[in-house]
Amino acid sequence: MRIMVIAAHPHFDKSRANQALAHELKHHADIYVRDLYEEYSGWEIDVEREQQLLTQYDRVVFQFPFYWYSCPPLLKKWFDDVLTYGWAFGPEGTALMDKEFMIATTTGGTEQSYQSGGDNGFTISELLRPIQRTLTRCNGIYLPAFVSYNVTPGTDAYLAAEAKRYVEHIQTSMRALIH
Ligand SMILES: Cc1cc2nc3c(=O)[nH]c(=O)nc-3n(C[C@H](O)[C@H](O)[C@H](O)COP(=O)(O)O)c2cc1C
């Protein structure tokens, strides 16, 4: 399975959690990892290149820190620019048919806070629905997300263990993830 990870962090240099995830990915040369904020520091996304890359991979993972219950803005722009009518959706837009998509996110909030009655009131699955629907609207398969909670006080050992869990999750077959 060919996997591409699109990492989007506005301050990757100051990151601990997403850096830990990216560091673990370096041990897996078969996974293509990209840093969106580095590649597009001028915010001019090369749509044709992105669309070509998408067609080359079976599974695309969007990795980001959870910011205001959503993704960082350059990734939102990537969705807006790359998922075009007639290519990703619409009557002729079938380029992403059955491609596997997955979110991988890190949160400041605890797992307990992300439930009804918890401090954040909703689960991560509920809060990620706009992205889920964007990807299914584009004929993609939306797989269960990887979430690393409460990363801010996490020790280096905790983050390293989460990174191992992350790489296992993104390499797991669709069948095993869903059933
Ligand atoms: C602008 C901003 C918005 C944030 N919004 C949320 C949020 O909605 N929910 C949450 O759990 N954490 C939130 N956080 C905390 C980040 O998710 C957390 O700092 C990040 O996952 C840590 O990853 P890193 O070490 O890779 O930066 C926010 C942080 C920033 C800076």
Image (cartoon, helix red, strand yellow):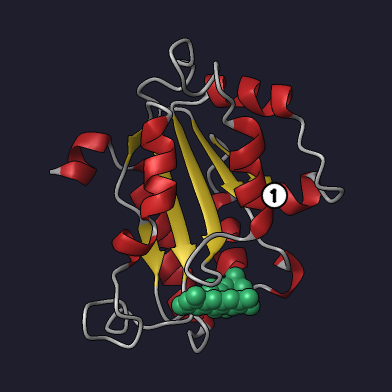
Residue 168 can be seen in this image: no
Q: Residue at coordinates 29% horizontally, 69% vertically from top-left?
A: 123
Task: Identify the residue under disc 1.
Answer: 35
Assign a secondary structure to mark 1.
strand
Above or below: residue 44 compared with residue 26:
above
Q: Is mark 1 within 8 Å of ligand 1?
A: no
In the displayed structure image, the side of residue 115 where residue 87 appears, left or right: right
Q: Quadrant of ligand 1?
A: bottom right
Disc 1 crowd rating (10 Å Cα; few below 14, some 14-19, many 20+) is some
Residue 126 location, quadrant: bottom left
Indicate the position of residue 104 as horizontal and vertical percent values.
Answer: 45, 56
In the displayed structure image, the side of residue 142 where residue 75 appears, left or right: right
Q: Residue at coordinates 39% horizontally, 57% vertically from top-left?
A: 128
Indicate the position of residue 68 as horizontal and vertical percent values.
Answer: 53, 72
Above or below: residue 43 compared with residue 109:
above
Indicate the position of residue 133 as horizontal and vertical percent values.
Answer: 37, 43
In the displayed structure image, the side of residue 129 where residue 6 appears, left or right: right
Quadrant, the N terminus: top left
In this view, the residue in front, 38 or 16, is 38
Query: Which residue type does callout 1 highlight?
Result: Asp
Above or below: residue 172 compared with residue 110:
above
In the displayed image of the protein, which residue is found farthest to the top?
92
In this view, the residue in front, 123 or 15, is 123
Q: Residue at coordinates 43% horizontally, 12% vertically from top-left?
A: 91
Residue 83 location, quadrant: top right
Residue 109 can be seen in this image: yes
In this view, the residue in front, 11 or 69, is 69
